[in-house]
Amino acid sequence: MLKELVPHGRTHRLAVVVASMLQYASVQDTKKGRAVAELLQGANEDGEYGDTSGKVEKLVERLFKDAKVKYKRTSSRGQSYSIIDGAIEEFVAWDSMPWER
């Protein structure tokens, strides 16, 4: 899926797709009692990913490498950024709905 979407996809849309993949992996892995779920749930607690961010980044980076697509991009202003960062931010804020407070 990433191989098809990433090359021409908009970063703000791709970040949500990858975050949803992480949410799905977390739920499925929890049902099977595996370590990936623990990592993702630890990252998702309280809407912060602090100490586990490096491990989560490596996990998401692996998704992109397996799909053989680049996750690093350059904006029209010449600034480098990563789809991974946006995906992790979306994942962490997945249940955060300020308008529901």
Image (spheres, rainbow, N blue to C red):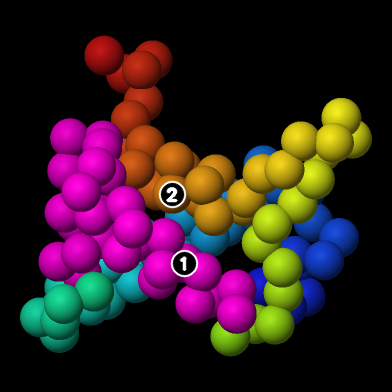
Q: Residue at x 31, y 52 (%)?
A: 53
Residue hosting label 2: 88
Q: Residue at x 31, y 64 (%)?
A: 55
Q: Which mark is residue 60?
A: 1
- Indicate the amino acid at tag 2: Ile
Q: Residue at x 52, y 47 (%)?
A: 85
User: In front here: 101 or 94?
Assistant: 94
Q: Which mark is residue 97?
A: none
Residue 95 figure quarter: top left
The mark nearer the N terminus, 2 or 1, is 1
Can the viewer see residue 49?
yes
Name the secondary structure under disc 1: helix
Please state if 32 lies on the left or on the right of 75 as rendered.
left
Name the secondary structure under disc 2: helix
Can the viewer see residue 16?
no
- Asked whether the beta carbons under mark 2 and mark 1 sit within 8 Å of each other, the answer is yes
Queried whether the magenta region covers residue 55, the answer comes back as: yes
- Tell me where the magenta segment starts and ends, as one range: 37-65
Q: What is the total number of numbered labels drawn onto the structure image?
A: 2
